[in-house]
Image (tube, coloured by chain):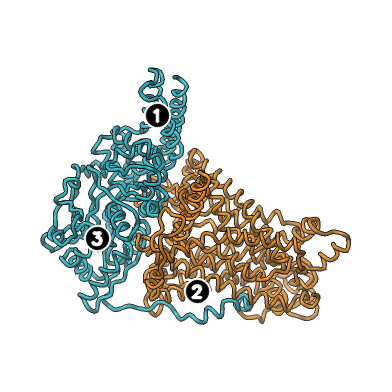
Chain colours: A orange, B cyan
Amino acid sequence: MTTTTLSAGPRPRFSLAARYGASMPQVVALFAVAIFLIAFLVVPIVRVFMVAFTHPEGGFTLVHFGDFFRTRLLREAFWNSLYVATMTVVLASLIAVPLATILSRFRFRGAALIHTLGVVPLVMPPFVGAVAMQLIYGRNGSINLLLMDWFGFRIPFMEGLNGVIFVEALHYFPFILLNLSASLSNIDSAMEESAQNLGAHGFTLFSRIVFPLALPGYIAGAALVFVKVFDDLATPLLLNVNNMLAPQAFLKITSVGITDPMGFVISVIMVICSVGGLALSGLLLRGRDFSTQQRGGGGLSQRELRRGGRIAATAFVIFAVALALSPHVGIFLLSIATVWSYAVLPDAFTLAHYQTIFREAGPLISNTVLYCGLAGLIDVILGATIAYIVLRTRLPGRRLVEQVAMSAVAIPGLVLGIGLLRTYYDVMLPFSGESLATFWGMLVIAYAVRRLPYAMSAATAALRQVHLSLEEAAESLGAGKFTTLTRVVVPLMTGGLLAGFVTSFATAAVELSATLMLVTRAGDAPLAYGIYVYMQSAAGRGPGAALGVVAVVVVAIATFVSYRIAEHERGLKSRVGALS
Amino acid sequence: MLATLTRRGALATAALVLVVGAAGGQGAENRLIIVTSFPKDLTAPYAKAFEKKYPGTKVEVQNRNTAAAVTFIRETKSNPPDIMWASAPDAFAVLKSDKLLQKYQPKAKGIAQKVGAYPVNDPDGFYVGFAASGYGIMYNTRYLKANRLAAPKEWGDLKKATYYRHVGISAPSRSGTTHLTVETILQGEGWDKGWATLLEIGGNLADVSDRSFGVPDAVNSGQYGVGIVIDFFGLSARASGFPVEFVYPSVTAIVPANIGIVANAKNRKVAEDFIEFLLSEEGQQILLDPKIQRLPVRLSTYKKAPAGYPNPFTDKRLKGIPFNSELSEGRYELLNSLFDRVITFRLKDLNAAWQAIHTAEAQLGPRGSAEAKRLIAQARTLATAVPVTEKEASDPTIAGAFRRLKKGEKVAGRQAEFESRWDATASKNYAEARALAEKALTAK
């Protein structure tokens, strides 16, 4: 993109800047984002969703939506989804808020490691994660077998709606952890110091000063958890809970030969609810200012904990991490188990499964890193662009673009896969003559589209904390918009952008449904596909789990590296080091 | 602007992305593209043996679940894969009716015409059976021992109160083979009696899985003890070392697993070679692999099978009952939806109703008062009732509502309307049955 047309300074030189507070490159950027979304989200999805508005005998109709509300099962499913999403936010907050606070407010050894481990729950390899969860928490999982042995009772962790809430909270609390941590590290310590000078400390300080200032991050994370859980399919299916919206839609859409439009009707309703959820979370923050002027990314002062506090904090961190990683412990055990059936632990251990996958793991890993890395990158670019245009300009249509991007969270991967196939299968690539839809780049696009809401939320939260006056100051000192952006805004948003990248990357690494639709060559396949192929037979359980472990390790390494870089940058900016 | 916006965010991944080269690449000219729902354990030995026999040929296996496979073939008409290879007979029926398959008459000799009561090949020649499988009961021996349960042998055993919430099945709407089992029970016992059996077993279900492999998966892990599954799931799990056993009940559905050439396939010649290879002596023998364990359709292959290997051509249990495929086709989609309404989506209510009935029967025994007996009988009637009669199920104006309408076809309502009604009846019935059974307890 050229920068020659940049309008320097706030001079009302031409109407664009005056009317919409926008410069030409911003308009172009908005157009570029819109075109991307129209091409790879709106058009493919509308082509699939059309059937929801088509009468059985042809022609446009809304009768199916009437049917939705007339059907008791679906009304029930609607309320169940709403209930589960709300309660998951509560439970996930109970894990994530203390964890984020401890990690960012107090000096804690191995914070980067714990941050990394906090992301790992997002990586739930398809099928393997489900089997492992059942083996640990299921009706006859390790914990319940022990409970039965010792006390003669069971806890139904994995049954009914409460089971869904439990599993979803374990799975998605990192959304809150990541976004809240990013927000907390952006709070100016001067705020905290002023409050302390005025006599506030302890809980008052946290509840009156620190938490309210970190609200954008918390809300972004909580809204994501809500919307994601509302639309999540994997967990209800894993627990065989059917009376929720996502499984009802999925069961309709994926049954062979069924032409009932209700599956798509439900999907449309889920999209509307998700966008509504985002709009609501935006309203909660409207009219409030969360930005701090000084140094932005300096962060709260990190303090040493007293002995009692340290023990309590350590205990909580260990508890939370152990809980969050228990499924992954199960996956690991599964990967080194010979047979594990109706027993607390596997019968015997072996490394044979790793031997089985050794040869094929290489290309699967490199494909996963390539696809998900690119998708994460695209998401951060698009997410930050949308966030900037929404919060810093008054361009018409900017909210619509944001909402369209957000709606991707409610689109089932399968539907996006079908849509992309339908739209792009007959488009050929210029040199290889290969179809665009089955070109590996399309997987990158599918991942990017589906994970864009995560990165966008994170970027929006980060930008809310950057005070406009910092940009104005830079500009009045003679920096152009471009320099301001790259030297001031982006660096101040680093934490949020990183959180966005990590969430997009980590969740894309285990995306299966779109993958299954678009992969046409074993050589192009990512890890999720490799896992799927193994997990269809009893003998494949071990190798599948081994690949699952590989997926988790790949994401963990990527996350750890990201955090080390972020910590390094933070260390350069922060004055904490000098103080202590 | 866009490029620099993320310069710092990109740093995090740059290192990782740099390591990675470009993925993909073009294969050899003689590429056979197979879309399949079969696991790697089955596809890999075939691909390897075929490539060895036909040097210069590359077999490209695309694993997709059945629904995704059908959709993929539908969406890629302009340049389709060569072969569809899967179990589910319904998937092939759908592809055939959408004109997405092409005819092929295999040349191999010595292949059975019928397995059980079912023709091996599509009568119209659009797909070919290459193996057979029978439905039966798989159970986890550790689980049964720990819960002091006897090993089940017949479908009827699964009705017993002792198996309450110990049984699993996959939904017929999600698994074409389960569908055939349900249809076999309905045809064998008659509509009303068949549904009574299904609903009584339904009362004992711990789960109705949304995918076929979910059931053996859960039995292997010991989440529940007994699964209604297709034989190779049980046999191959046992061969892989899991503490499970598999039995065929005396009435079972035997169904072929199929392969078909996709319409407009690029490599028709290679596809034909592959089908012939599957049916050859060499190809059929691969089915005996402990990790595969499907029943060959070539009669002579059984001579090489290990002792105790099931043989549907000699074993009386696997003879099957006469199967009316016209009847089955006429109510195919309706049956799937009906099963989901009355069992899958109301499983908790059905469980509760049957638990109440079992409790009342156990506590009262034969000594119960006439009033109590009457109440229990009434509860049983409600908990085994299905909201559709056999005649309605085959009525095109009702069954048609569950299919894509043909031009000029008229139906009596939309699918959602029927489903809503059935759901209401089912949940009302189960609630009443439960109340009656509970009342019987106090009517001593």
Judge whether B159 appears above or below A27 on screen.
above
C-alpha distance separating marks 1 and 3? 50 Å
Amino acid residing under circle 2: Val
Have a look at marks 1 and 2 and say if they share a chain. no
User: Considering the numbered disc 2 on the image, is that residue within a helix, a strand or a loop?
Assistant: helix
Question: Disc 3 is attached to a residue of which chain?
Answer: B
- How far from the left and from the top, in percent, is residue B251? 23, 42
- In the rendered image, the residue lying farthest to the front is A150
Along the line of sight, which residue is nearer the eye, A149 or B333?
A: A149
- How far from the left and from the top, in percent, is residue B307? 18, 57
Could you tell me which quadrant the C terminus of chain A lies in?
A: bottom right
User: Considering the numbered disc 1 on the image, is that residue within a helix, a strand or a loop?
Assistant: helix
Question: Disc 2 is attached to a residue of which chain?
Answer: A
Query: Taking A445 as reference, is B389 left or right?
Result: left
Amino acid residing under circle 1: Ala
Residue A518 visible in image: no
Q: Residue at (28%, 55%) from the top-left corner?
A: B235
C-alpha distance separating marks 1 and 2? 60 Å
Of badges 3 and 2, the one in the foreground is: 2
The residue pinned by badge 1 equals: B362
Marks 1 and 3, the one that precedes in the sequence:
3
- In the rendered image, the residue lying farthest to the right is A198
Which mark identifies residue A369? 2
Q: Residue at (62%, 78%) from the top-left corner?
A: B7
Along the line of sight, which residue is nearer the eye, A442 or A21?
A: A442
C-alpha distance separating marks 3 and 2? 35 Å
- Mark 3, other Cα within 10 Å: few <14 / some 14–19 / many ≥20: many
- In the rendered image, the residue lying farthest to the left is B109
The residue pinned by badge 3 equals: B259
Q: Residue at (15%, 62%) from the top-left corner?
A: B304
